[in-house]
Image: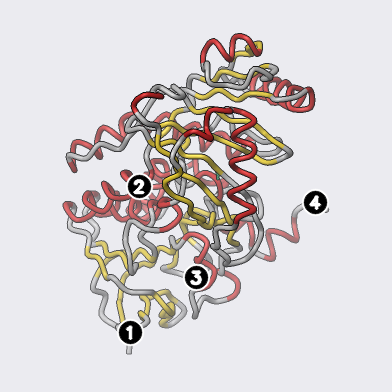
Amino acid sequence: MSPTPTSDVLVVGGGVIGLVTAWRAAQRGLATAVVDPEPGGGAARVAAGMLAAVTELHYGEQTLLGLNLRSARRYPDFAAELTEVTGQDLGYRRCGTLAVALDADDRTHLRELHALQQRSGLASQWLSGRECRRLEPMLAPGVRGGLRVDGDHQVDPRRLASALVTACERAGVVFHRAWAERLTVVRERAAGVRTADGTELAAGRVVLAAGSLSGRLAGLPEQVRPPVRPVKGQVLRLAVPERYAPFLSRTVRAVVRGGQLYLVPRENGELVVGATSEELGWDTTVTAGGVYELLRDAHELVPGITELPLTETRAGLRPGSPDNAPLLGPTELDGLLLATGHHRNGVLLTPVTGDVMAHVLTTGELPEEARPFAPGRFTAAALAEQPA
Ligand code: GLY
C-alpha cells in the first residue's frame, strides 16, 4: 500500500540549498517539509561565503559561470527579501575582492585569469603591487600585482542558513528533525523517505538536497544516484581586535603553491581564512598540517595575521560533482528531483537554486537557465554520447 502524502514536497537536507528550495516552494503554495537532524547545518557552517563568480572563474567552466553570475545578480534582492521576512541581517557585504600574486608564477597565472575574464566580458582591473598595497596596506611588501574585482561580494553563510530556517518556519515549512535513511519507492515513483527511527514520511515529490551525502541515501535506484563526492575544506576563523581594524577592507585571495587561499573580513571583526581542498572521503578532521599550511600561506600574504587571536578551526565537505557544477531538477525516477553537487559555489548559487527548484516544482519544467545542469547529463546513456 502506498503511504498517504503528508506534504506536496519533501526536501531531504536542511543546508542552505535544501532550505532555499523549501522556502521558495512553500511561498508558491506547496505544502513543504524538510527532513534533517539539524536544519541550518551542513557545509554552510564552515564556508567563508565569498560570492566570487569572477575571481573563482576556471577554464572550462564558462557554462557554470553563467549560472554563477545570474545568482550573484540576484543576491541584493534576495538578501533584502530574506532580511525583510526574518528581521535578520545576513552580513551581505558589497566589499569587492582583490586577487593578488606573490611571485612571478602567480603573476602569470593572474594575468591569464585576467585575460579569461576579459574574454568572458567580466569586469576586473589589473593593479600593480604598489596599487594593491595602497588599497590594502596590510598586504606583504612582496605582492607583485593583482586583480581588483569590485563585483565579487560576500555573505555570512551561518546567518544565511539561520535566516532561511526562520523564513521556512514563517512560510509554514514543517521540519522533521531526523536522518533520512531510505528513499521510499512505490510503483516506480519516489513517495517519501523512511527516517533512522523508522518513521515513514510520505510526499508527492522528494527533492534530494543533502550536499555531499546525497549519493548515500539508501533505496536510490542506481541510475538516479547523484555522482557527488565529499571534497574536504579546512577553514580558520580569527578575530580582528578593535585596535587593528580595519585589518582588511575587502576579500583578499591568492593562489599559493597551487592552492586557493582567501581571507574574508566581516563587518563584525571576524576574519575567515580558507581553504584546503582535499579528496579524503568522509574525513572531517582538522589537522595540524591543514592549519599550518593555511596560516603559513596567509602569513606570506598578510604578515600581520599572526598577531590575531585564532578563534575557530573547522572542516566541512563540499559536494563535488564530476564537472564541478550542480545537478538541478527532475531525475529519471518519477517524483524524485535533485538539488545537489554545488561544490565550491553553494552559497553563491543559493538564490538561483531556490528560483529554479520552485519553478520546476510548480510547472514541471526546468527553466532555460538550468537546463545545462539537469541531472540527466550523468546518466550512462548521456555519458556514452559524449565525445571521448
Ligand atoms: N568557494 C570557496 C571554497 O569552496 O573553498
Residue displayed at 46% across by 35% down:
308
Distance from label 4 to label 1 (Cα)? Answer: 46 Å
- Which residue has dot 4 on it? 387
Side (left or right) of 56 relative to 203: right
Looking at the picture, tell me which residue is in the foreground, 175 or 7: 175
Neighbour class for label 3 at 10 Å: few (<14), some, many (≥20)? some
- Which SS class for mark 3? loop
Residue drawn at the location 37% of the way across and 28% of the way down? 93
Give above or below for 279 relative to 246: below
Q: Would you call the spot at circle 2 few (<14 residues within 10 Å), some (14-19), or many (20 or more)? A: many
Question: Number of marks in the image?
Answer: 4
Across and down, in percent, residue 154 comes to 42, 33
Q: CA distance from mark 1 to mark 3?
A: 25 Å
- Numbered badge on residue 249: none
The N terminus lies in quadrant: bottom left
| Residue type highlighted by circle 3 | Leu
Labels 4 and 1: the sequence-earlier one: 1
Q: Name the residue beneath numbered marker 3.
A: 333
- Looking at this view, is 40 or 170 the one in front? 40
Q: For mark 2, what is the residue?
A: 158
Q: Position of residue 34 (x, y in %)?
A: 30, 64
Report if the beta carbon of the residue with label 4 is closer than 8 angstroms to ligand 1.
no
Q: Which badge, 1 or 3, comes first in the chain's sequence?
A: 1
Vertical position of residue 193 compared to residue 149: above or below: below
Label whose residue precedes the other's in the sequence (3 or 2): 2
Residue 233 image offset from top left, x and y in percent: 56, 52
Please report contact status of discs 3 and 2: CB closer than 8 Å, yes or no: no
- Look at mark 1 in the image and give the residue it sits on: 197
* Residue type highlighted by circle 2: Arg
